[in-house]
Amino acid sequence: MKQYAQDKLIAVFGLALVAGGLWLCTYYESDSARFPRICFISIGVLLAMLGAESVMTEKRLRAVGKSGEEALPMNWGPFMIVTLALVLYGAALVVLGFYSASILLLLAVGFLWKVVKKPTIFIFTVCFQIFLYVCFTILFKVPLPQGLLL
């Protein structure tokens, strides 16, 4: 697969996920949805730029009669696991709320990343949740999605 074809594939797949994320934001209150919408729109703009660049690269290479570089082999397994984890996190935000879903995401990523020791995963998760609580709830007073647990 050519590099520009791989970039187009990633851009299209990513834009579909962005659209799904924006749809999930409709479940939030308008104030709570502002930050995730900004994030999804920013990611969407970057993916659209990647897609546009790959289309322009393909046209430029065809105009000069070159075929383009072969893409480096991509290990799709970890990519799909991370993508699935983010989709599940987005769904968990609606059901469980921000803090509970974030705890589960951090623990899952820590355990999937087999290099990190288990006590380190738990310590990081607790410290990061305290940091998020202090920043979002106490300092900035950001209304976050609340679900069944928090």
Image (cartoon, rainbow, N blue to C red):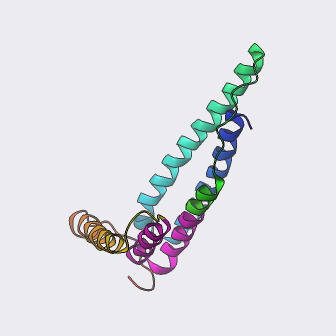
Which image quadrant is residue 2 in?
A: top right
Residue 27: % across, % down = 53, 71
Q: Residue drawn 32% across and 74% down?
A: 119
Q: Quadrant of residue 141?
A: bottom left
Left or right position of 20 against 62: left
The span shown in magenta is 84-112
Q: Position of residue 122 (x, y in %)?
A: 33, 75
Residue 145 % position (x, y) = 42, 73
Judged from this view, the residue extending furthest toward the top is 64
x and y, in percent, of residue 30 in the image: 45, 66
Q: Is residue 23 left or right of residue 132?
A: right
130 vs 74: above or below? below
Quadrant where the N terminus sits is top right
Q: In the image, is residue 66 above or below residue 125?
A: above
- Chief SS of the magenta region: helix
Is 11 magenta? The answer is no
